Image (cartoon, rainbow, N blue to C red):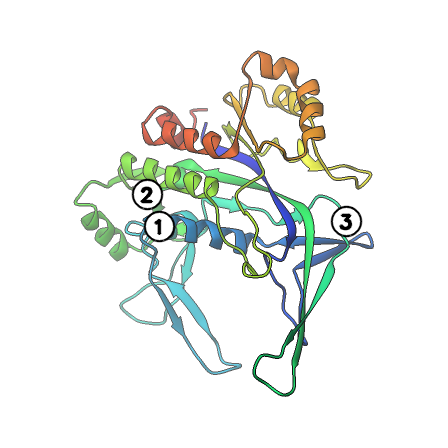
């Protein structure tokens, strides 16, 4: 297996975790219109920022950020150090650093950690809260903002062999230039190795570092914190539900397992769909399917899932627990080296 495929559900209760661009004194939440109905969402960029910040709070050293260009209307850029050997977030979340300097080459890396948009599983009526700032001033200042209650779901995919692996040749969104490769090799005190990776020459960090980075990412999702408007709409951002399955290829079989009901009545987690997907991808996944489900969250849907997936649960194909220990136990398995074969592409 070489990928971790999954689905995450965030339960938003009277919250505004990701704001859109306002044109007046009203701060809107991000939202989309689908077939005439309103679906609030949290962008993948916002979620990835929460994960990165949670990793930093846990002790991971973030990559340095440099902003270039200040004038309005002029080209403006903000780039990280673009050093994936030294910084776990540059490795896991990717970057692009374009330069015109003669002694520095453009370098880029697309993200091994891919996340979808956290879209509401059902249409939602967004509310507006009205506020007044009148403390110590004669003329009060009026303002308002939007908020909503919804379950937001998104898929994710983690390309495990690509964590800590950087192609040296250009032409692929995964490369570092030769000078950076030499610096990286020196930075890990010759612990890195040169390998052939997906048809290209690549620099690969020691397995211990790669294990630790993946484990830290999963632990950050388990302890996730972040979001806008916390002073007015504080809310727990740890996943209410998370499903994870190791896959041989970059396919996510959980897309229609965790979804919104067709009649717009909310979240459904379908055990019958999971069974059919596992049968269809036989030989391409490794059990158990790990399902983290917070106690008290959508109890009716949970009971229905248990009824539909009773055979899978009884034979150990599906393991159900709380999202935090499910993710942290998986992180421990990875960090302890019990699933090292996941870090190499399967032999075909």
Q: Say left or right for 222 vs 134.
A: left
- Secondary structure state at the residue bearing disc 1: loop
Disc assigned to residue 204: none
- Secondary structure state at the residue bearing disc 2: strand
Q: Position of residue 32 (x, y in %)?
A: 72, 57
Q: Residues within 10 Å of mark 3 (few under 14, many from 20)?
A: many
The span from disc 1 to disc 3 (Cα, nearest Å) is: 46 Å
Q: Mark 2 — residue?
A: 201
Q: Mark 3 — residue?
A: 123
Q: Quadrant of residue 208?
A: top left
Q: Residues within 10 Å of mark 2 (few under 14, many from 20)?
A: some
Mark 1 or mark 3, whichever is nearer to me? 3
Q: Position of residue 226 (x, y in %)?
A: 50, 53
Residue 264 is at least partly visible in this image: yes
Identity of the residue drawn at 39% across and 39% down: 214
Q: Say left or right for 282 vs 199.
A: right
Q: Position of residue 25 (x, y in %)?
A: 67, 75
Which of disc 3 and disc 1 is earlier in sequence? 3
């Amino acid at each position: 297996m070489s990928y971790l495929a999954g689905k995450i559900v965030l339960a938003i209760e009277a919250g505004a975790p990701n704001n859109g661009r306002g044109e007046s004194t009203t701060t809107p939440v991000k939202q989309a219109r689908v077939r005439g109905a309103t679906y609030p969402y949290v962008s993948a960029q916002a979620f990835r920022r929460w994960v990165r910040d949670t990793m930093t709070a846990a002790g991971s050293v973030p990559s340095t950020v440099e902003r270039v260009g200040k004038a309005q209307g002029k080209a403006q850029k903000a780039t990280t150090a673009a050093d994936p050997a030294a910084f776990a977030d540059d490795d896991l979340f990717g970057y692009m650093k374009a330069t015109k300097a003669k002694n520095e080459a453009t370098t880029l890396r697309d993200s091994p950690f891919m996340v979808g948009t956290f879209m509401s599983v059902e249409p939602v009526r967004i509310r507006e809260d009205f506020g007044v700032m009148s403390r110590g001033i004669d003329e009060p200042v009026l303002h308002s903002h939007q908020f909503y209650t919804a379950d937001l779901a998104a898929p994710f995919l983690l390309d495990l062999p690509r964590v800590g692996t950087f192609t040296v040749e250009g032409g692929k969104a995964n490369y570092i230039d030769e000078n950076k490769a030499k610096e990286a090799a020196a930075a890990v005190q010759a612990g890195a190795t040169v390998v052939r990776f997906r048809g290209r020459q690549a620099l690969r960090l020691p397995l211990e570092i790669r294990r630790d980075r993946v484990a830290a990412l999963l632990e950050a999702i388990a302890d996730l914190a972040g979001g806008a408007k916390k002073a007015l709409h504080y809310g727990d951002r740890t996943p209410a539900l998370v499903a994870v399955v190791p896959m041989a290829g970059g396919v996510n079989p959980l897309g229609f397992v965790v979804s919104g009901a067709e009649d717009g009545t909310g979240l459904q987690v379908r055990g019958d769909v999971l069974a059919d997907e596992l049968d269809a991808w036989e030989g391409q996944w490794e059990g158990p399917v790990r399902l983290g489900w917070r106690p008290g969250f959508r109890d009716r849907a949970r009971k229905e899932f248990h009824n539909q997936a009773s055979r899978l649960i009884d034979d150990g194909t599906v393991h159900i627990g709380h999202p935090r220990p499910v993710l942290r136990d998986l992180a421990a398995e990875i960090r302890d080296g019990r699933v090292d074969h996941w870090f190499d592409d399967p032999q075909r």
